[in-house]
Image: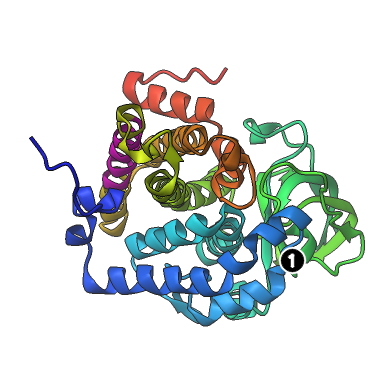
């Protein structure tokens, strides 16, 4: 039988996670954790309550750590491993999903689109400024009626002489109202194409979406394109069809595989500390069997998710990861992280709904993470198609 009392350990220490990381990965993880402790955690409850986050200032601070586009090579980017990027996302989301969203939309959507599909001129113009936090980017794919089915988009780009003219709207766009540049995907006679759109271009507006109950410490916007005229070289030359934007989404989903676990870990560590100090009847809440059963089950799911994330990170670093494997990670880890946040709230009881503790904030955020960049149902169908060879999307 185990001793009646013992020194508690952190949930992920049960899995000896540090033994699976190299020194650089641990250093990056710990640096991001300290940054969040010093610069995000003291303010995040207020940002969330006020639905106002200093995105531009934060971008420059995050850039000073090399976090913007950190897994890209050249153009001022840090060129870290995918696994190190994932660990950074985990620590950012342990502070708040909105902060991780700022970084992942900047690096894995807007910057990655230019890096992967842009001309050398586009790369030179935008990537150094974006990696330095001097320019924020956003990614305009989703429309009000076309989320899971981006192929139905109504935004159109037509040629007018040497120029392109864009018309349409995009919805639920992170960073939209603070961005200097938008990657906008539109239908053309040649199929779906991507465009680099400076947000000061006449006809472009990005009204912020308000009254959100989730991701309140994140800028979310609508993009409106009303006869936005762009020069011919604004098109991303290497992106044709939906494969372009979908590959960008796969890049961003990878960060969510790790990031969601950060929110779950923060909930679980908060809850363990709370349970150890909260007295119920004649002993601590942590000393009750039902509490320990909940904590054990949640720690197990957190650790399993972490092992999956690290395995996917190693596959990505080896250049062997497949989109359906990213879907496995996103489906499992977000779903389990949300379940952990909800279960933690039951242990904190009424205290769990207050801003004094981060649990309800994480749970509310994870409700959005569950459905953005591919709903659970979409990922189930991606996995199902890989297993059966049959598409069930139509």
In the image, residue 299 above or below residue 96:
above
Name the main secondary structure of what is drawn in magenta.
helix
The percent position of residue 270, horizontal first and vertical second, equals: 45, 50
Q: Quadrant of the N terminus?
A: top left
Camera sees residue 372: no
The percent position of residue 334, horizontal first and vertical second, equals: 46, 38
In the image, residue 32 above or below residue 153:
below
Q: In the image, is 130 to the left or to the right of 282?
A: right
**Image quadrant where residue 202 sits:** bottom right
Does the magenta portion include 298? yes
Q: Quadrant of the C terminus?
A: top right
Residue at 67 percent of width and 80 percent of height? 134
Q: Nearer the viewer, residue 195 or 198?
A: 198
Residue at 29 percent of width and 59 percent of height? 317
The percent position of residue 129, horizontal first and vertical second, equals: 63, 80
Q: Nearer the viewer, residue 381 or 165?
A: 381
**Image quadrant where residue 41 sits:** bottom right
**Image quadrant where residue 168 sits:** top right
Query: Residue farthest to the front?
Result: 282
How many discs mark residues in the rendered view? 1
Camera sees residue 171: yes
Q: Nearer the viewer, residue 245 or 214?
A: 214
State which region is magenta: 294-307
Residue at 59 percent of width and 78 percent of height? 61
Q: Nearer the viewer, residue 317 or 358?
A: 358
Q: Which residue is mark 1?
A: 179
In the image, residue 190 above or below residue 43:
above
Callout 1 environment at 10 Å: few (<14), some (14 to 19), or many (20+)? many
In the image, residue 13 above or below residue 172:
below
The colour scheme is rainbow
**Element class at badge 1:** loop
The percent position of residue 83, horizontal first and vertical second, equals: 33, 60
């Amino acid at each position: 039988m185990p001793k009646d009392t013992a020194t508690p350990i952190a949930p992920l220490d049960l899995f000896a996670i540090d033994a699976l990381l190299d020194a650089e990965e641990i250093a990056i993880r710990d640096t991001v954790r300290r940054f969040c402790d010093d610069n995000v955690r003291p303010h995040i409850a207020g940002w969330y309550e006020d639905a106002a986050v200093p995105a531009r200032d934060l971008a420059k601070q995050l850039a000073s750590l090399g976090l913007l586009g950190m897994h890209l090579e050249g153009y001022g980017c840090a060129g870290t491993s995918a696994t190190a990027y994932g660990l950074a996302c985990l620590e950012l989301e342990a502070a708040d999903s909105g902060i991780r969203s700022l970084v992942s939309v900047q690096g894995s959507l807007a910057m990655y689109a230019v890096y992967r599909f842009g001309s050398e001129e586009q790369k030179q113009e935008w990537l150094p400024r974006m990696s330095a936090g001097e320019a924020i980017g956003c990614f305009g794919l989703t429309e009000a009626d076309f989320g899971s089915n981006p192929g139905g988009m109504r935004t159109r780009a037509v040629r007018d002489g040497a120029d392109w003219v864009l018309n349409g709207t995009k919805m639920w766009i992170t960073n939209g109202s603070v961005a200097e540049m938008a990657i906008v995907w539109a239908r053309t006679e040649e199929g779906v194409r991507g465009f680099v759109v400076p947000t000061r271009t006449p006809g472009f507006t990005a009204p912020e979406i308000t009254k959100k109950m989730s991701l309140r410490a994140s800028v979310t916007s609508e993009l409106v394109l009303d006869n936005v005229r762009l020069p011919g070289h604004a098109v991303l030359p290497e992106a044709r069809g939906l494969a372009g934007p979908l590959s960008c989404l796969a890049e961003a989903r990878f960060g969510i595989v790790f990031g969601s676990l950060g929110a779950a870990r923060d909930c679980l560590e908060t809850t363990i500390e709370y349970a150890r100090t909260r007295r119920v009847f004649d002993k601590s809440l942590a000393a009750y069997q039902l509490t320990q059963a909940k904590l054990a089950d949640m720690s197990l799911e957190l650790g399993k998710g972490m092992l999956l994330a690290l395995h996917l990170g190693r596959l990505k670093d080896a250049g062997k990861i497949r989109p359906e494997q990213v879907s496995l990670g996103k489906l499992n880890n977000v779903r389990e992280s949300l379940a952990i946040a909800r279960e933690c709230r039951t242990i904190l009881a009424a205290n769990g709904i207050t801003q004094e503790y981060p649990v309800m904030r994480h749970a509310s955020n994870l409700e959005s993470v569950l459905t953005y960049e591919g709903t659970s149902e979409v990922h189930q169908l991606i996995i199902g198609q890989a297993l059966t060879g049959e598409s069930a999307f139509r």
